[in-house]
Image: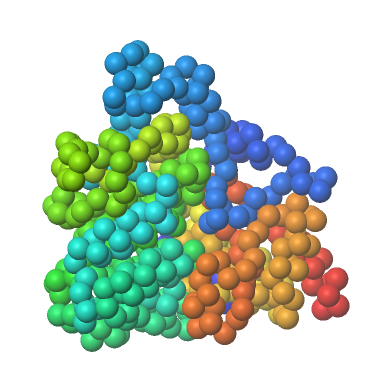
Amino acid sequence: MSSLSLSEAPAATPLDVERIRQDFPILRETTNGKPIVYLDNAASTQKPRAVIDAISGHYERNNANVHRGIHELSNRATDAYDAARGQVAALLGITDTAELVWTRGTTEGLNLVAWAWGMANLRPGDEILLSVMEHHSNLVPWQLAAQRSGARLRFLEIDDQGRLDLSMLDHLLTERTKVVSLSHVSNALGTVNPIREIAAKAKAAGALMVVDGAQSAPHLPVDVPSLGADFYAFSGHKMCGPTGIGGLWGRREVLEAMPPFHGGGDMIEWVDLESSTYAPIPAKFEAGTPNVAGAVGLGAAADYLAGLGREAILAHERALVAYAVERLGEIEDLTILGPRSLEERSGVVSFTLADIHPHDLATILDSEGVAIRAGHHCTQPLMKCLGVGSTARASFYLYNTPAEVDTLVDALHKARGLFGY
């Protein structure tokens, strides 16, 4: 793979990474006696002090259940919980906060759509269009929806750079296509998919457009409503927030027409013994006691990212990816997977090294303090298309540095030597 050009990176005020790193207490930790080099950000990102303090502060000062309490603690918790929805909505360009449903993360958001919308709308003979690069979270729910409804799954293929092959899109989009569900950014390859273009064609064909935004919400300056989709799901823990919280944005008219996903408290308007009416959105999809502290933490994360600037984060990541590709290219027998163009790639670099198993690579790198991910990355069909069982994956974020890329490369040279290459 050739070096990536930085001329395509957006202009932005450079991040002060050394200052930013001081915001993340875990980056001062060591592993195996060495400074930690955390390059597993596509799996989960680290948390700044602002997020940690927001969560602990909630439990220390405001902890109570929300919405139905009369007492002061409940009022304070409710205010913070509701404010967090606005903070996250602002980061993602969402002007109607009622269109933002709290979930446990991307997986639950996609399951919500596949179950609630799918149960109400899919029929035998309908078609669901996905791609071979989808994360299992955007594949298995639709498999289940197809099994329940009798709908058929169809798939976009990829080219030799791991980009969606759109040459068959017009052929695959027919009057039978009821939903198109695609990842905005591939978690395994870093490929940035042209969602606006695809969404426009899906809508013209009368299909619902669903976006897996797990890897785009943290890394791209996304204005969600302008994508032209009907749904967009994302996870808090991949964008400096806590685990167990995320969101699903949906167009108001689609959300209002959908049946609930879960039944219980807070999602009802009135309950009789044999029937119920439901609360307005987003409450209709938020049954039970919510993850109040998680929402507060995610709100703090949204403010933190907004303060740094989304364009600046993207520019920093692209510079790191360009440098990583250049340095990794120095290693004999190492193959980088994914798009060659910087504009078509997020902060992920997946690779193989000779015939060394990625799990062995990850183990050796861990002994050097370098944390990467190795495996099929919950994309087994994609691995099959690529002709590999698994890959090693280094993924970058706003606190990573060129020096950490150098440490990764040195550790890979060591691994290569240990295996006799």
The x and y percentages for residue 314 are 44, 52
Which residue is pictured at 31% across the width and 49% down the height? 262
Q: Is residue 29 in view?
A: yes
The x and y percentages for residue 131 are 38, 76
Task: Relative to 85, say whether 60 is above or below.
Answer: above
Front residue of 204/337: it is 204
Q: Quadrant of the N terminus?
A: bottom right
Q: Residue furthest front?
A: 273
The x and y percentages for residue 373 are 63, 61
Which residue is pictured at 33% across the width and 13% down the height? 71
Which residue is pictured at 70% across the width and 37% down the height? 28
Task: Relative to 39, say whether 284 is above or below.
Answer: above
Q: Is residue 95 in view?
A: no
Q: Is residue 261 left or right of residue 419?
A: left
Front residue of 29/172: it is 172
Q: Quadrant of the C terminus?
A: bottom right
